[in-house]
Amino acid sequence: MLLVEDDASIREVAALGLVRAGLRVTTAVDGREALATWRKQEFDAIVLDVMLPAVDGYDVCREIRRTSRIPILMLTARTDTIDVVIGLEAGADDYVKKPFDVPELVARVRALLRRASAPIEETTMSVAGLEIDPERFVVRKDSRELSITATEFRLLLELARRPGRVFTREMLLDRVWNYSYLGDSRLVDVAVQRLRAKIEDDPNQPRLIRTVRGAGYKLMAE
């Protein structure tokens, strides 16, 4: 995996913890080096700091997301909700706030890797005007393939398996992110917003993914 962090002490501690957890780690110290390294090697996941010299983490994430669905976890010292949302909207799958405990970081990375490697043995399904192909991680609407991240795909697939059923945020964190206790409900809300922007005719008036106030979300069958 690729660890991108400009602070030497944080980089060393995080890398040591990940290596002790049995992961192979390559490091980069800024955004340009991160992109150059990513283009030359194959990685299973990326841990990416937000505040980087040269090219910040948001732009690195956006560039990678142009061509790759690799799991990305962002490290952020910022605590405002808007900064977390920007990272997730850039295409990150998860985030960890600094200062962090190494066991938490390791647990989050392992969850990302488990999710990315978990097989989905289902046939293509059609629901709510969408064609969902689990084998290829492809979603089509009106015969047009949509640009969708792996996390957004898994979220849509979970909702589509049971159209009309209400899923709480906790259920989705468990089933989509594999987090039974570590997750943040903002992950779900931002992922739903991004998914709506791609599958809805009017994301501001969603017809397919409905919010059930006080409960969660559901995908309408029609």
Image (cartoon, rainbow, N blue to C red):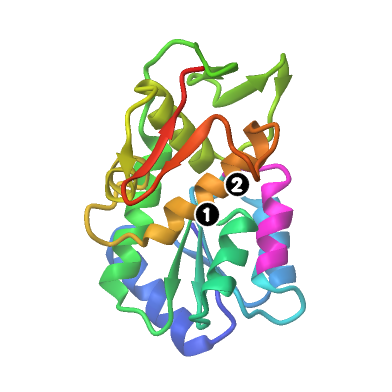
Q: Nearer the viewer, residue 63 or 131?
A: 131
Quadrant assignment, res 103: bottom left
Residue 183 in the image: x percent, y percent?
A: 33, 59
- Secondary structure found at label 2: helix
Q: Is residue 58 above or below residue 71?
A: below
Q: Nearer the viewer, residue 6 or 165?
A: 165
Residue at image coords 39%, 85%? 99
Residue 32 in the image: x percent, y percent?
A: 75, 69
Q: Do the residues labelled 1 and 2 touch (CB within 8 Å)?
A: yes
201 horizontally vs 217: left or right: right
Magenta segment main secondary structure: helix
Residue 4 in the image: x percent, y percent?
A: 57, 70
Looking at numbered disc 2 in the image, what kind of residue is underneath it? Arg
The residue labelled by disc 1 is 190
Residue at image coords 49%, 48%? 44
The residue labelled by disc 2 is 194
Q: Is residue 137 above or below residue 59?
A: above
Looking at numbered disc 1 in the image, what kind of residue is underneath it? Val
- Secondary structure found at label 1: helix
